[in-house]
Image (spheres, grey):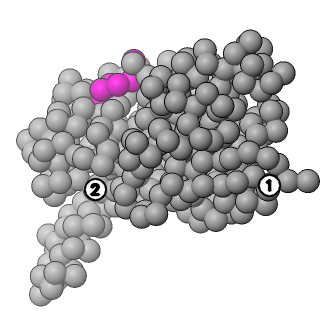
Amino acid sequence: MGLNGHIFVTRRIPEAGLEILRESGAAVTVSQDDEEKGVEMSDLLAGIGGCDVLVPLLTEPLGSEQLEAGPGLLGIAQMAVGYNNIDVDAATELGIPVANTPGVLTETTADFTWAMLMAVARRIPEAHNYMVAGRYKLWGPNLFLGGDIGRGASGRRKVIGIIGYGRIGVAVARRATGFDMEILAHDPFNREGIEADGMADWAELPELLERSDFVTLHPPLTPETRHMIDEAALRRMKSTAYLINAARGPVVDETALVRALSKGWIAGAALDVFEDEPAMAPGLAEQPTAVLIPHIASASHDTRSKMATMAATNAIAHLRRERAPNVVNPEVYDTEAYRRRAGK
């Protein structure tokens, strides 16, 4: 027997997830009709107000106003690992379980971190643009000189500094061993893990910034990590070093990064995320040593499809009034507010 209820999907997710939702028998509405346009706030509020389960993305702000618009909302099943767009405390107070899609994008994001690292160090986007613009007339020995990632002709082992040593940070470190790199890591919540796994050496943040040839960012966004890479941090880095951010945009002070790139404090930066997405800080787009990517670190067919199916599975659990497999606020199930919503 099919499920009764209405699932509101804010933006089109991969078909693998939509298929699961439709096969459940529930009514499914996808708000987005143009993939390059978001969801208007009026449409978001109306959708929340008329649904039993909400399937959003990071692009939708879900604060108290939006959550309170859904008196019949049984749960939120976000298609993302992060959920800093959701006021989880407010959701818990209102009795709304919130679920995400953890673990699935680790390897894909680590791969993409390395794609960005190699692209910025070897100046691949610059060289591509030069080629397709018809500017390549004659090979020369000074054409697009970049930085080595392995030992290179100098024979010196390069140092990679990994900030945030969770699943993705560990996966990035594992790849670094193939380049015979010295690996430093900093994570105030996982020092024991860093010291135990044998791949990376623990370093305090100032030491990591000063010694690393490549600094990759993988921490969660918290009040403590917001702008952790500020002007002072950028000035500590080598002038030959590269910064790679595949975590959250606000971890980096973009205005300070523009100064660092324009003044040559560092050799380059590769960003997949931005402080005020999709906007960039003034001047960033004009920096020739910046590789700028539209938030696609997890964008492989397999990974995005898996994220969509996980979100769909969470959504159906919400609709069945069951514990969602990936709930981030499990304490909500013990609240009177949830019992009232679920009719228990």
Question: What residue is drawn where x is 85% and y is 53%?
Answer: 2
* Depicted 195 relative to depicted 326: above or below: above
* Depicted 32 relative to depicted 100: above or below: below
The segment highlighted magenta reads 224-229
Question: What residue is drawn where x is 16% and y is 72%?
Answer: 143
Tell which of 43 and 229 is nearer to you: 43
Question: What residue is drawn where x is 43% and y is 22%?
Answer: 222
Tell me if residue 220 can be seen: no
Residue for badge 1: 24
* Depicted 269 relative to depicted 238: above or below: below
**Which label's residue is closer to the chain start, 2 or 1?**
1
- Res 303 → quadrant: bottom right
143 in magenta: no
Tell me if residue 71 can be seen: yes
Residue 113 horizontal/vertical position (percent):
45, 51
Residue 324 horizontal/vertical position (percent):
76, 35
Q: Secondary structure at mark 1?
A: loop
Residue 167 horizontal/vertical position (percent):
61, 38
Q: Secondary structure at mark 2?
A: strand
Left or right of 57 in this view: 341: right
| Real-space CA distance between mark 2 and mark 1, rounded to the nearest whole angstrom | 42 Å
- Give the number of the disc on residue 291: 2
* Depicted 325 relative to depicted 106: above or below: above
The amino acid pointed to by label 2 is Val
The amino acid pointed to by label 1 is Ser
Q: Residue furthest left?
A: 263
Tell which of 37 and 102 is nearer to you: 37
Question: What residue is drawn where x is 59% and y is 41%?
Answer: 50
Residue 203 horizontal/vertical position (percent):
44, 23
- Res 48 → quadrant: top right
